[in-house]
Amino acid sequence: MKRKSDLLNFLYERGYIHQSTNDDGLDELLAAKKVRAYIGFDCTAPSLHVGGLIQIMVLRTLQKFGHEPTVLLGSGTTRVGDPSGKDEMRSVPSEEQIEKNKQSINKVFAQFINFDQGATSVDNADWLLSLNYLEFLSQYGRHFSVNRMLTFDSVKIRLDRRQPLTFLEFSYMLLQAYDFLELHRKYNCTLQLGGSDQWGNIVNGIELIKRVTGNEVFGLTSPLLTTASGAKMGKTASGAVWLNEDMLSNYDYWQFWRNVDDADVIKFLKLFTELPIAEIDRMAALQGAELNEAKIVLANEATTLCRGKEAAKASMETARSTFGGGIGEDLQQVELEADSLKDGIPAFKLFVAAGLCASGGEARRLINGNGAKINNEIVAAETELINGSYVQDGKIKLTAGKKKHAIVVIV
């Protein structure tokens, strides 16, 4: 279906859209004028992970098509906790930690969005923390039907499983709706974006604005992605794939994209790179070992967007060096005091210390299955003592399986 708006055509073609509250009306609006749209991110951790990257890419795309993105960092709503997708109440960070998280998260957006060209960043604490509770209930609470709120997934799923839902969490959707109202009044924001799990919250905001101002605004959601294996996007066996460099090295970020399942490559190229569709379609014809070319392209393009061109280049060179038998400079690194090597360290303990194994038992199984290497040589025994003779140029290279590597730096 061909739409009037070039932006909507692009978003649908790439697979960014899951639901729209009024597709035809939004199409008319986007084709006729510059639109301000926002996405909210709570400050629950020092970094977002790749599970939220699809929404960031939508904001970036919106700006590239001449519209105005707003990033809402919810240090106010973080104090409440969004119940969406959770079986129990989220832990609430301290006010100091929330502020640190906000500052840390903000760094990532500068990679994707140009704040010198109409984009803005706001914090809902600026208006939520000063709300008068009784006044808020009187003016806005009357517009919300509890019967309706009980039908939204964020509430219904928790209740169906007979798991507790606090009033604090229940009030989250009111606060998010109020966020949209504030942004509409202050910044003429007419579109809220989010993941599909935010559908109910977005609809609440649209209805609140209609009842309070009489104006029509819009909502657009993106799909919540899972990998071909069924895993939630952004989660791996070794932990979250963080966007911030201080939470995950450039090399590990690059490797995440390089090692995606064959079935995910083309979909991820459409969502997480800006390559032309024609080029992606060409790569869709690749099969077998040739598909590795597409994975390297995906890793380079995705890493360039988030971490910069030099990070992508260095990560690819490190991968070539590592898999070619050399010791790379951008692998996961841990420091070890030289004195600790005098009597030697059992190999299985070293793999745990380097973060390649979660426990001694896991390390023993890895070694006994011939899956562990030190300086590219298979470790013969789990209790093999690793001493100064293993040090090469001040480092020891560890390999677990085919894809996990670490460098032990001797200090």
Image (cartoon, rainbow, N blue to C red):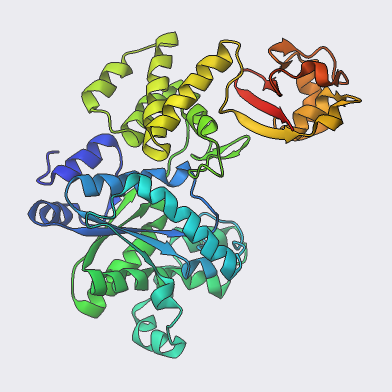
Q: Is residue 407 above or below residue 217?
A: above
Q: Is residue 135 above or below residue 5?
A: below
Q: Quadrant of residue 141?
A: bottom left
Say if residue 260 shows up in the picture.
no
Image location (x, y in percent) of residue 391:
75, 19
Q: Is residue 268 above or below residue 201?
A: above
Image location (x, y in percent) of residue 17:
29, 44
Nearest the eye: 269 or 398: 398
- Counting the numbered discs, the total is 0
Q: Quadrant of residue 207?
A: bottom left
- On screen, residue 277 versus residue 233, left or right, reads left
Residue at 81% in and 30% down: 338
- On screen, residue 122 versus residue 7, left or right, reads right
Nearest the eye: 218 or 235: 235
Residue at 85% in and 31% down: 340
Q: Quadrant of residue 285?
A: top left
Residue at the far right in the pictured view: 343
Residue at 79% in and 22% down: 365
- On screen, residue 394 versus residue 59, left or right, reads right
Q: Is residue 142 above or below residue 92?
A: below
Say if residue 124 shows up in the picture.
yes
Residue at 85% in and 26% down: 341
Q: Where's the C terminus, which quadrant?
A: top right
- On screen, residue 404 versus residue 27, left or right, reads right
Image location (x, y in percent) of residue 407:
67, 26
Nearest the eye: 285 or 385: 385
Image location (x, y in percent) of residue 120:
30, 60
